[in-house]
Amino acid sequence: MRNIKRSFLAMHNLLQASRCPRCPCVLSSSAQRLFSTCASSPKVCIVGGGPAGFYTAQHLLRARSDVVVDIYERLPVPFGLVRFGVAPDHPEVKNVINTFTQTAQHERCSFYGNVSVGTDVGVEELKKAYHAVVLSYGAEGNRPMGVPGENLAGVFSARDFVGWYNGLPSNKELCPDLSCDTAVVLGQGNVALDVARILLSPLDFLKKTDITQQALESLRASRVRRVLIVGRRGPLQIACTIKEVREMINLPETKADMLPGDFEGIAEALKDLPRPRKRLTELMLKTVKVDEGRQKANKQWGFRFLRSALEVLPDADGKKVTGIRLAVNTLEGSGEEARALPTGQTQDLECGLLISSIGYKSLPIDPSVPFDSRTSTVPNEMGRVSHTGGLYCSGWVKRGPTGVIATTMNDSFETARVLLKDVDSGTLDVSVNKAGAQEITGLLKSRGVRPVSFSEWEKINSEEMRRGEALGKPREKVLDVREMLEVAWSSS
Amino acid sequence: MSFSTAARRLVGLSLSRSSWILSRGVNTSSKTLSSLSRLSDPSKDLIRKRDITSCNVVQPLRSENKVTVNFINRDGEKITVKASPGDTLLDVVVQQDLDIDGYGACEGTLACSTCHLIFEEETYKQLGPISDEEMDMLDLAYGLTDTSRLGCQICLTKSLDGMTVRVPESSADIRQSDGSA
């Protein structure tokens, strides 16, 4: 096995050395091999193989014909939240994977999965081996609710819950108990609505998606009939987007259970709203009216506004959640900037499942990288990490965990533009030859870490699609990292 | 989805699919990455969901039937191309390999807003009706205007000959949602 790996790496390095299609240096191929690379080709390392990493790579490769890009990813599988975050019933969004695949297969791009930056290799080591390092490692942490009872059984972060139904290896043993009638989701962003929708979607529909089979079996046995989506502010401040609300409204055999009182005075505010907010609010208002008369549904969902978590209520044994105590809020100010202030009143909601969806949070990756613990981002100007030459960032670690795929695309393109501008202006010195992946793969080998290449990922991909086909699904994900590696490195 | 819509979508699929394959045939350019976001696997096209309400017109591909479209790119550069009636503006960008980075990320399935284009007022009035789903995605677009549409939903007709569309700049940052993408 070792020999195979070594020869693979050698071949890879050779291939990489002979890149640079428009390289000005006139070297014979053997001389290129000797020098391993052309001095003028900027080598960029990207940390994180999610959408931010791939969009940054895409723009770099497209904008310059000499830049070499290597993407390092902690898991053996690429695509980050497109694989593990995007809801299984949103396959259209996952079409971006086709573009990412073409990027990864580009002759000047390489993918190194199964490499954990910060553990297997340090950021300083990457900086030494590359002209520039782009941090695109996303937001792997959670914002905690910070209330008593947060750790009771039956309380999950949306991140873990989503990771569970999407096959994230670290969440494969979550086994949420879905035997209760009511679930409460704390937070009203698109992730909260994804969770609510998955809990209430008909099984016949979900079974045709790439949701994991174990999640499907749990949902088949689920007795959850009612999902309440709780936000600390009012309808005019709701964080989700209209597509997700429309999907909730269109769920079969499910009706919206809104409190008309929450929408008093909202109709009057409509005319001054910008178009997206106006259309979203109009849709909610319509739902309050229409669904008052809809009887046939046996499942319900509803928004609950102006409520903040105070305490998760335990059962008699003090082990499992039976409800949540909420503070009743009032708004100070208006519009997007309105603040929620507690009135002093409280309200208890009964629930056997509580999912906290109040936001993701980036974590620091390495002591050498600046980190703003207040905003949980890497401090930067347009993607250029403050006071640190050669270091850039894109995606959630750059601007916080918000936005749709287009947001991440645009901010990643911006980072790539800024990086290339720095190359042109000389701020980023690319005149010195850097060894790039050759150096890093050498280090990894000495540490017993074997990366997963993109073609090895494609073996996992084929296997997942094969397993999916047998179940009538587009894909059945491999849930275990060890199994992923076995498939990746199998000889077939 | 009603049966008739489904049927029309199927027709549209086979149409757009054959034109895509055609384009791939003649377009095996050396600019590997400029053809990013283009599908190479026809089987993937089958899962493509597309609203083709105004696209089900079969037109012969003779050059006199072509429609001229002017694109004003993000940097102000004007690109003029000839395209076939029945194609969507997304098809045109793909087939002609236009250099608009990130255009059409979801591949015409109404799941993103990256094919957003801005039309001249007179042209905008001639375009077909706009669905709620397209409006929903446009609401998330950068630089939304009163004459914005998604390129994947606009099918070329002879009457649109000579039109000019602008690719919006993408630098502004809207932060509207918490990000399930």
Image (tube, rainbow, N blue to C red):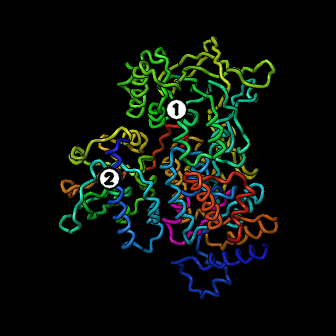
Q: Which residue is mark 2?
A: B166
Q: Is residue A384 visible?
A: no
Q: Amino acid at mark 1?
A: Ala
Label 2 or label 1, whichever lies nearer to me, is 1
Query: What is the quadrant of the N terminus of chain A in the image?
Result: bottom right
Q: Chain of mark 1?
A: A
Residue B66: x and y, percent? 22, 64
Does residue A411 lie above or below A444 as drawn? above
Placement of B31 over or under A89, stated as above or below:
below
Left or right of A131, for residue B154? left
Q: What x and y, as percent, mark residue B53?
A: 29, 47
Q: Position of residue B160 (x, y in %)?
A: 21, 54
x 36%, y 56%: residue? B13
User: CA gap, disc 2 to disc 1?
Assistant: 30 Å
Residue at x-position 54% and y-position 72%: A66
**In the image, is residue A57 part of the stretch drawn in magenta?**
yes
Q: In which image quadrant can residue A229 be found?
A: top right
Q: Is residue A10 left or right of residue A198?
A: right
- Span colored in magenta: A55-73
Which structural element holds mark 2?
strand
Local SS, label 1? loop
Q: Is residue A373 left or right of residue B131?
A: right
Is residue A310 located in the magenta-colored stretch of the structure? no
Residue that carries the numbered disc 1 in the rendered image? A239
Circle 1 Cα neighbour tier, 10 Å, few/some/many (<14 / 14–19 / ≥20): many
- The residue lying toward the viewer, choosing from B149 and A283, is A283
| Nearer to us in this view, B175 or A320 | A320
Task: Please state the total of marks drawn on the protein image.
Answer: 2
Residue B31 occupies quadrant: bottom left
Name above or below for residue B3 compared with residue B77: above
